[in-house]
Image: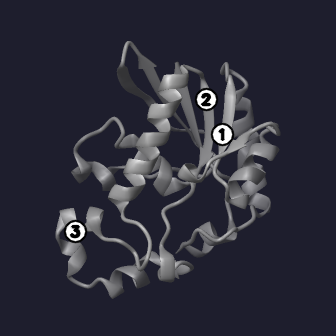
Amino acid sequence: MKIYLVRHGFTQSNRARTESVEDPKLNKSGFNVLVNTRRTLEKYNIDKVYSSELKDATQTADMLGYHDYITDSRLNELDFGDYSGQLLEEIQDHYDGVLDNEEDVFNLKYPGNESRNDLIKRMSEFLDELVEKDENALCISHGLAIKAALFWILKDKADWDSFWIENGSVTIFEIHDNKKIIKCVNNI
């Protein structure tokens, strides 16, 4: 079985480089990048489509021609809580010194919400359920959520900053005989 993870098209929040779980809409360039994504996905046999509940992901599903999808909150972006809508640099200023310790970065909960470890856990639970269903699934999600999904397979969180997930890109996992393989990251 294969799991295809697609990051939503480009949004105004992406342009402004703000972190948010608010419901941003795709902008014109967000639709344009999805033309290539749609062509890429035509090559794959997809049994079921899942989407984050957020508007940028559901709009992406529609733009890709998948109108019969199931929304699942576990595919939503990391919840930055009170820091939603701020630049990453501004968020880091609030945690001056705390982010110097690598393990703190993964356990740090944004005010009233979740940590990177929480995000990895919820994405892993979702992916484990997909494996149980044994279906080729397309999952439309968000940059940090897809990055967290990589750590369903990878174990060394020191590699977190080694990955960037592009808007409209396809990341592919293959699962065979309980072996999980990252086939590609950022196929555009």
Return the x and y of residue 47 as percentages of the image width and height: 68, 22
Q: Residue 50 carries which label?
A: 1
Give the residue at mark 2: 137
Q: Does the CB distance between marks 2 and 1 fall below 8 Å?
A: yes
Q: Is residue 178 left or right of residue 24?
A: left
**Viewer-side residue, 117 vs 96:** 117
Return the x and y of residue 75 as percentages of the image width and height: 56, 50
Q: Which residue is drawn at 62% across and 48% down?
A: 72
Return the x and y of residue 184 as percentages of the image width and height: 46, 31
C-alpha distance separating marks 3 and 2: 33 Å
Mark 3 or mark 2: name the one nearer the start of the chain.
3
Mark 1 or mark 3: name the one nearer the start of the chain.
1
Q: Is residue 109 left or right of residue 138?
A: left
**Viewer-side residue, 34 vs 113:** 113
For the C terminus, the image quarter is top right
Q: Residue at x 74, y 51 (%)?
A: 58
C-alpha distance separating marks 2 and 1: 7 Å
Farthest residue to the top: give it: 177
Q: Helix, strand or loop at disc 1?
A: strand
**Viewer-side residue, 56 vs 53:** 53
Give the residue at mark 3: 104
Mark 2 or mark 1: name the one nearer the start of the chain.
1
Residue type at mark 1 is Tyr
Q: In this view, does 118 lie to the left or right of 96?
A: right
Return the x and y of residue 92 as percentages of the image width and height: 35, 80
Q: Does the CB distance between marks 1 and 3 fall below 8 Å?
A: no
